[in-house]
Image (cartoon, rainbow, N blue to C red):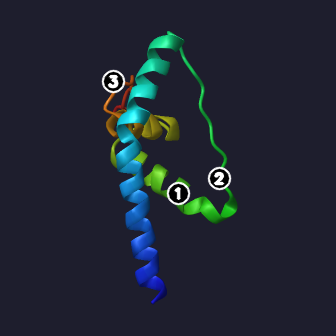
Amino acid sequence: MYLLGKRERHAGNRAAIEAERPEIAAWAREEHARAGGRVPVGTVFTTDETRVLEAIDAYAASHNLPSRSAVVREALSQLLDIQVEIEPKRSA
């Protein structure tokens, strides 16, 4: 019963995010154009969220990206469908 409720809640969250995606993408494009330079963005993860960092690190390693920020930049570029300069990949 709990699992079913969790799945429904997650499906609702995904639908809400998808519905907001065009608005978020438009905002991101406007901010990108307005900033004209670099805008730092950061986040802090709790110890309970170490799996997120492990996933980011695994993605960076498997896609030959140099850092966590490169993973985030690539993900946001794809998610928001905007051109974001991605850090150069590591040479093999």
**Labelled pair 1, 3 in contact (Cβ < 8 Å):** no
| Distance between mark 1 and mark 3 Cα atoms | 24 Å
Quadrant in the rendering for residue 40: top right
Depth check, front residue: 42 or 24: 24
Asked if residue 3 is positioned above or below residue 40 in the image, the reply reads below
- Residue 87 visible? The answer is no
Quadrant in the rendering for residue 3: bottom left
Rendered location of residue 24, percent (x, y): 43, 35
The numbered mark, 2 or 1, whose residue comes first in the sequence reads 2
- Amino acid type, mark 3: Gln
**Labelled pair 3, 2 in contact (Cβ < 8 Å):** no
**Labelled pair 2, 1 in contact (Cβ < 8 Å):** yes
Q: Secondary structure at mark 2?
A: loop
Image quadrant containing the C terminus = top left
Q: Residues within 10 Å of mark 2 (few under 14, many from 20)?
A: few
The numbered mark, 1 or 3, whose residue comes first in the sequence reads 1
- Amino acid type, mark 2: Phe
The residue depicted at 60 percent of the width and 61 percent of the height is: 49
Rendered location of residue 14, percent (x, y): 38, 57
| Distance between mark 2 and mark 1 Cα atoms | 8 Å
Instruction: Provide the residue designation for mark 2.
Output: 45
- Amino acid type, mark 1: Val
Q: Secondary structure at mark 3?
A: loop
Image disc number at residue 70: none
Q: Secondary structure at mark 1?
A: helix
Instruction: Provide the residue designation for mark 1.
Output: 52
Rendered location of residue 56, percent (x, y): 47, 50
Image disc number at residue 83: 3
